[in-house]
Amino acid sequence: MQIGFIGLGKMGGPMARNLAAAGHRVTGFDAAGVRIDGVAPAAGAAEAARGRDAVITMLPNGAILRDVYAEIVPAGRPGSVFVDCSTVDVESARAAAAEAEAAKLLAVDAPVSGGTGGAASGSFTFMAGGSPAAFEKARPLFEIMGARAVHCGGPGSGQAAKICNNMILGISMIGVCEAFALAGKLGLDPHSLFDVVSSSSGSCWSVNTYCPVPGVGPNSPADHGYRPGFAATLMLKDLDLSQQAAAAADASTPLGAHAAALYSEFVAEDREGLDFSAILPWLAARRREP
């Protein structure tokens, strides 16, 4: 396939590289001038999209997505598929899909789970929203860039699934970190707590796969000075999106709101460059509030 790829940062760059390595002809554009081996550079987003069989975007937020779609949709070839892998608000995802469909393009919103490691290894889970025909046309690309793709429903459904999933993740990581911080103050060895929790009712991804304690459990960012696999700033972004969605849907999410507030405070204290699991030492250093 001839593929246009717009947004070649830490996530998009490896995704484009994997598509090119699989034999597709990929033309890419990034506003920061990033170049990727095996990906032909374009002078602009419209040039990257013009006449392609598929166009993939990986962008920072909904406002930029809307601006980019205003530029690339007129350059799209009718019948091609536009796949947005950004994590944005549901309304922006639906607006982008509507604009694409009005131009007789297939549209899929397909945010990812798996972080920078998943981008490099091609092991993402894609959460996809769009018509069945659009999803099926994009499926071969998902199979190269990821390990699993779930069709969640119509336009915006992929973003809704991503927002809900990451609200769970943010809440659960805080709970895990609070438990390990409490265990440390009670004199309990973290290895012992891991052995108990990982095989009992407290078991969850934040413990079993991504334990926030250095030297405990499988290798994780905690073992590398909390260099991000998934940055705290990105977790805050997703939690804020969850609260925007909750407000629009009149949904009660008290734990989601509290998790967003805690990550906001954490990031504000000059911790932008750390993994979201680094909230553990931050919580451990705090005293109990009256």
Image (cartoon, rainbow, N blue to C red):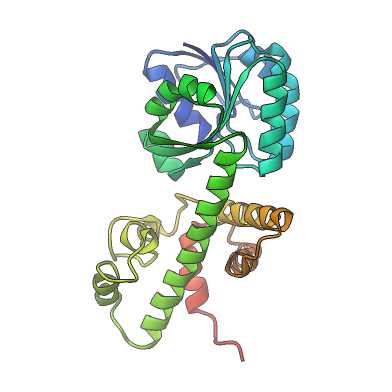
- Quarter of the C terminus within the rendering: bottom right
Q: Residue at x 40, y 40 (%)?
A: 118
Residue 236 pos. (x, y %): 61, 57
The image quarter in which residue 155 lies: top right
Would you say 251 lies left or right of 36 here?
Answer: right
Residue 42 pos. (x, y %): 62, 14
Q: Residue at x 56, y 55 (%)?
A: 235
Would you say 175 lies left or right of 69 here?
Answer: left
The relative height of residue 213 versus residue 161 in the rendered view (above or below) is below
Residue 49 pos. (x, y %): 63, 15
| Labels in figure, total | 0
Report if residue 90 is visible in the image.
yes
Would you say 240 lies left or right of 273 here?
Answer: right
Report if residue 231 is visible in the image.
no
The image quarter in which residue 24 lies: top left
Q: Residue at x 66, y 43 (%)?
A: 90
Residue 37 pos. (x, y %): 45, 20
The relative height of residue 87 versus residue 248 in the rendered view (above or below) is above
